[in-house]
Amino acid sequence: MSFASDVKKELTTLEVHRDLAKSELAALIRMNGALSLANRHFVLNVQTENAAIARRIYTLLRDHYEVQAEFLVRRKMKLKKNNIYIVRLKQETQKILMDLDIFDNGMLMDHVSDMIIGNSERMKAYLRGAFLAGGSVNNPETSRYHLEIYSLYENHSRELKEMIEYYHLKAKTHNRRNGYITYLKGAEDISDFLTLIGATTSMLKFEDVRVIRDMRNSVNRLVNCETANLSKTIEAASTQIENINYIEATVGLGNLDERLQEIAELRLQHPEVSLKELGELVPSGPISKSGINHRIRKINEFADKLREGK
């Protein structure tokens, strides 16, 4: 099961007060519902591929409106042959939709109710329903953090963005496949959003994986940095030793200045150490890295002049 499925499964187990259940239902029906007329009565079909979400819709309607909805299962024939779950409401459909404030002139409204906008707890419940209806979130172990909610309507997507921003999270919107997405990219924002909609256990799992992943990445960066520095040290030491051996083979190290000769001999004795460590090995006293670097540069220049015949 994917991480997004785990989050949704957790959300479908939450107990909510009637007032907040209405806000959650409003989002679920608004985003996954379709109205039709049969015998002059409105029929509502709320469709999803997630059985737990369908049971959630069915239970919320039964518990808070005391109506008996139908629970249907259909087999999807094209592409992935997943089941489609339909919650069908034939009783008091218009009355319930009006109570949820998502019904207008025989249609589902294309905006969020004013009874929800601005009310912190109702907006949290609505965002929970919106995530259940059209949300997804990447596994935190993947290469990037991403949480999104898909909606068919631009106005609705914009309102989702504004509600998320109400809680100081950095949401953005984007066109996607004949619809729109409202999304979060920052790991902290995603973690806060999961807490916001009630997915506390999923948030803790997200944080555990994120911390381990970030720590692993930090260790890898340090190792890579150390490896790069070590490679540079080895390469520089090899050049220095090559020059010192050339001087010794052609004119002898005795032709170097006494201070340079001392460093040349030390480098031959300790080819693996860094310049800083080489400075600490000088018998006459520690020499700074810059001091050692200056003398090594003089030795290299001496070797270059010998090769040029000067």
Image (cartoon, rainbow, N blue to C red):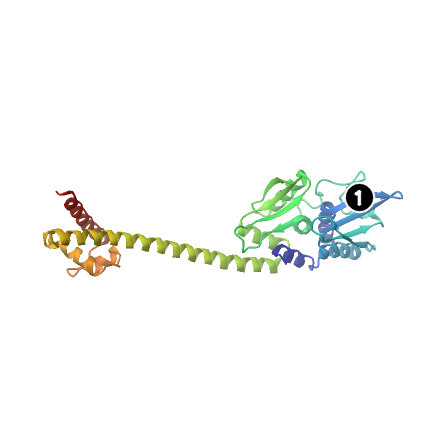
Q: In terms of image quadrants, where is residue 40?
A: top right
Q: Amino acid at mark 1?
A: Leu
Q: Is residue 140 left or right of residue 89?
A: left
Between 250 and 209, the one nearer to me in the picture: 250
Residue 208 pos. (x, y %): 53, 60
Residue under the point 32% across and 55% down: 230
Q: State the image coordinates of residue 91 (x, y, percent, origin top left).
A: 85, 50
Q: Residue furthest right?
A: 39
- Residue visible at 25% across and 54% down in the picture: 238
Q: Please state, as top left, top right, bottom left or bottom right, where the N terminus lies in the image.
A: bottom right
Q: Which residue is mark 1?
A: 35
- Residue at point 20% right, 58% down? 268
Number of other residues with Cα within 10 Å of mark 1, as a class: few under 14, some 14 to 19, many 20 or more: some
| Residue 70 in view in this figure | yes
Residue 198 seen from this side: no
Vertical side of 221 occupied by 163: above or below: above
Furthest residue to the left?
Answer: 255
Decide: is 155 above or below 137.
above
Label 1: which secondary element: strand
Determine which quarter of the picture holds residue 69.
bottom right
- Residue 102 in which image quadrant: top right
Percent position (x, y) of residue 192?
57, 53
Q: Is residue 276 left or right of residue 201?
A: left
Left or right position of 247 against 41: left
